[in-house]
Image: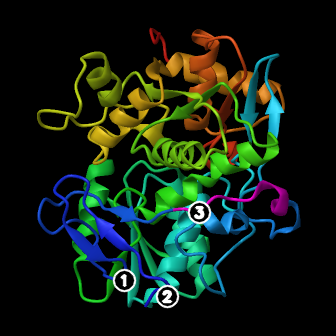
Amino acid sequence: MLAVMTAYVCPRCGSRAAADTLTWCCPQCRGPWDLAFTAAPVPLPSLASRVNSLWRYAEALPLATSLPRVTLGEGRTPVVPLSETVSAKLDFLTPTLSFKDRGAVMLAELARRLRPRLVVADSSGNAGTAVAAYTARAGLPCAVYVPEGTSAKKLEQIRAHGARLAVVPGGRDAAARAAQEAAGEPGAFYASHVFNPHFLHGTKTYVYELWEDGGGTLPDTLVVPVGNGTLLLGTALALDELHGHGLISKRPALLAVQAEAVSPLAAAYRAGATDLTGPARPAAPTLAEGIAIPHPPRAAQILRAVRDNGGTFLTVTDAQIRDAQADLARRGLYVETTAAACWAAVRAEPPRPGSTVLPLCGAGAKTGLAAPPADGEG
C-alpha cells in the first residue's frame, strides 16, 4: 500500500481507481490515467541543503511520503550555453544516459511499494533502459519489450541491467501491444511511461531544476521534443504548479518539436484540431527514433498543453537532425540523433527574443553518429 493514497483518474471519462491498483489504464475507455495529486509549494531557500537527486522536490512528488526511496542520484543536470540566448540542459548526463531516468525512478519506487510478480515496460530504447536500471536498483524482476530496429547499444544496456528483453517484430506500436498483453497477466505491473502518470510527475523535475538554478525564475522559452509527450506534459505540470503557487509570475512559451517524417501532433495543431483523428499510420523511417510515435495516447493533452502555454509545433527533417547532431558534437556535446532534434529546430527557426532552454535528452553512445546521407537524400 502507498504511504499516502492518491487516486488515478481518467481525463477522458472521469473514471477513478486507487493508486495501489495494477490496472494500467482506464477500464471504461482504455485511456491513460492522470493522478489526483496536489503538489505543495517547494520552498526555494531550503533546497541547497537537500538530497542531490530529484527527491529534493519532495513537496511536489506523489511518492515522497516515506523512506526508503529508490534512487541512482538522478537529476541535477547542468545547463550550458549554445549561443547568446539559447542554452542546453544536459539531461543525457543521468545514470542511464537519458532523461527517462526522471520518470523511471518514480515507476520503480511505485513498484517497490506494490511488490508485483513482474514489472513490464515497452520502449524504443531509452525508457526501457531506464526502467531496467531502476527496477534492478529496487530488486524487482523486469521484462522490456522493444521494436525491431532498436539500437544495439540500447539492447545491450537493457540486458546488462538484468531485464528480460523481448524484441517484437514491427514498430513501436507493436512493442506496446505486446507489453500490454503481458501486463494483463496476474501480478504484473505495467511500468508505462505513457499510461502511468507517476512518470510525468518525475519528468516535471526538469523544470523544477531550471527554476531552482534560475533563482526562482524560468527562461522565456522552453523547447521540448515530442513523441509520446512525457517530457512536455511533465513540463506543463511543473508550470501549472509553479504558477499556481505564485512561484513564477509568467509561464515560458512551450515549443514542441517533432520529426517531419512522423509528426501527427504538428499536423493536428496546424489544422486546429484538439485531438488526433482517423486510424494511426505506421511510423515512417526517421533518425529521431525516440519521438517517432504515430498515435500518442495523450495527444489531446499534449495539444492542449502547447496551446495553454503560448506555444507551437516545429518539425525538422532528417538532414537537419544529422547536421545538428554533428554541430553539437563539434561543440563537445555528443548526443543521440533524437536528442539533436530541438537544436535542429532552433537553428532553423530561432525563437522569439529572450532566453531559451532546450534539453539534450540522450547520449550519443546509445546510437552513434548518423550515417552520411544516401545519394539523392535531402
Along the line of sight, the residue nearer the viewer: 162 or 227:
227
| Tag 3 residue | 40
Q: Real-space Cα distance between discs 3 and 2?
A: 22 Å
User: Where's residue 108, x and y in %?
Assistant: 53, 76
Disc 2 crowd, CA 10 A, few/some/many (<14, 14-19, 20+): some
Q: In this figure, which colouring scheme has been used for the structure?
A: rainbow
Query: Residue 175 vs residue 118: left or right?
Result: left
| Magenta stretch in the rendered image | 39-47
Determine whether label 1 and label 3 are within 8 Å by CB: no
Asked whether the viewer can see residue 373, the reply is no
Q: Secondary structure at mark 1?
A: loop
Determine whether label 1 and label 2 are within 8 Å by CB: yes
| Tag 2 residue | 113
Is residue 261 rendered magenta in the image? no
Going from N to C along the chain, the mark reached first, 1 or 3, is 1
Above or below — where is 199 with respect to 209?
below
Asked whether the viewer can see residue 13, the reply is yes
Quarter containing the N terminus = bottom left
Above or below — where is 166 with respect to 118?
above
User: Where's residue 265, x and y in %?
Assistant: 32, 30
What's under tag 3, amino acid-wise?
Ala
Q: Secondary structure at mark 3?
A: loop
Q: Which circle, 1 or 3, is nearer the viewer? A: 3
Look at 22% across and 57% down and name the residue there: 31
| Tag 1 residue | 20
User: Where's residue 77, x and y in %?
Assistant: 77, 50
Is residue 45 rendered magenta in the image? yes
